[in-house]
Structures are given as C-alpha cells and as structure tokens.
Image (tube, rainbow, N blue to C red):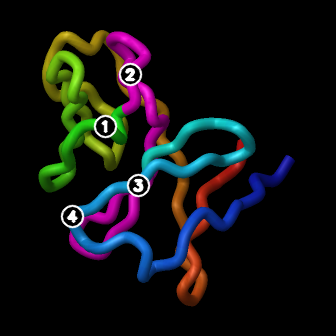
Amino acid sequence: MSIGFVRVAGRGEIRAGEMMAVEVEGDPVLLCNVDGEYYAVHDECTHECFPLSEGTLKGHCVTCLLHGARFDVRNGEVLALPAYGPVKTYAVRVEGDDILIAAE
C-alpha cells in the first residue's frame, strides 16, 4: 500500500523557527520549520497527552509547555524527562509552495 500525502500549509504560512498545529486525516500534527527544513511530529506529548503546539521550538527541539519534556522534531527522540517515549514522526514533502505530510 502506498502512502498518500496531504497538503497542510503553504510555505509562506510558516516561517523559519515557527511551528503550527495542523491535522492529517483527523490526527493532530505539529509542523515545524527549522531553518527552511520542515518536520512533522504527533502534536501530543508522550508524558501527559498535552499539545506540543502549546510549547516552544528552539532549533530542532520542541519543549512541552506543561512539564518541560523535550523532543527532537527530526526523529521524535526524547531529549528530556518526564517524557517516557518518542513522539511519532511523519514524512514531509514540499511541492512548489505546498507543504505535504504523509497520511498513514
């Protein structure tokens, strides 16, 4: 089965160093622009089901506002407790001015 991609934003909608909450087939996804590269992770901290989009993005690190858990947006890896597991990542593709995220 091939993976389909869903348009979630235009390149002009999210500047470098910014993030935005989007939805892919009903799933909350956090789209991040890190120096012109786009990354997408599940928009929910694995520690306590809180939206990561409420937190902050610094470089490749997103920090959850609730308890300070941190994740690498490139691979979902936990960088700081109290998170206990990685966040799911999504493939991102840019076609022209459109940003697309893999729908699984």
- In 3D space, how far apart are the residues under numbered discs 3 and 4 (Cα atoms)? 11 Å
Residue 62 lies, in percent from the top left, at 23, 41
Looking at the image, residue 38 sits to the left or right of residue 97; the answer is left
Q: Residues within 10 Å of mark 1 (few under 14, many from 20)?
A: some
Name the residue beneath numbered marker 3. Answer: 20
Tell me where residue 51 sits by quadrant: top left
List x then y, in percent, for residue 82: 19, 10
Distance in Å between CA atoms under marks 4 and 1: 15 Å
Query: What's the amino acid at mark 1?
Result: Glu
Judge depth for marks 3 and 4 and give the one in front: 3
Quadrant hosting residue 16: bottom left
The secondary structure type at the circle numbered 4 is loop
Using the image, determine if residue 50 lies above or below residue 13: above
98 in the magenta segment: no
Q: Is residue 78 above or below residue 54?
A: above
| Amino acid found under the numbered disc labelled 4 | Gly
Residue annotated with mark 1 = 54
Please report contact status of discs 2 and 1: CB closer than 8 Å, yes or no. Answer: yes
Residues marked 2 and 3 touching at CB (< 8 Å): no
In magenta segment, residue 41: yes
Secondary structure beneath dot 3 equals strand
- In three-dimensional space, the C-alpha distance between marks 1 and 3, rounded to whole angstroms, equals 9 Å
Q: Earlier in the sequence, mark 4 or mark 1?
A: 4
In the rendered view of the protein, which quadrant contains the C terminus?
Answer: top right
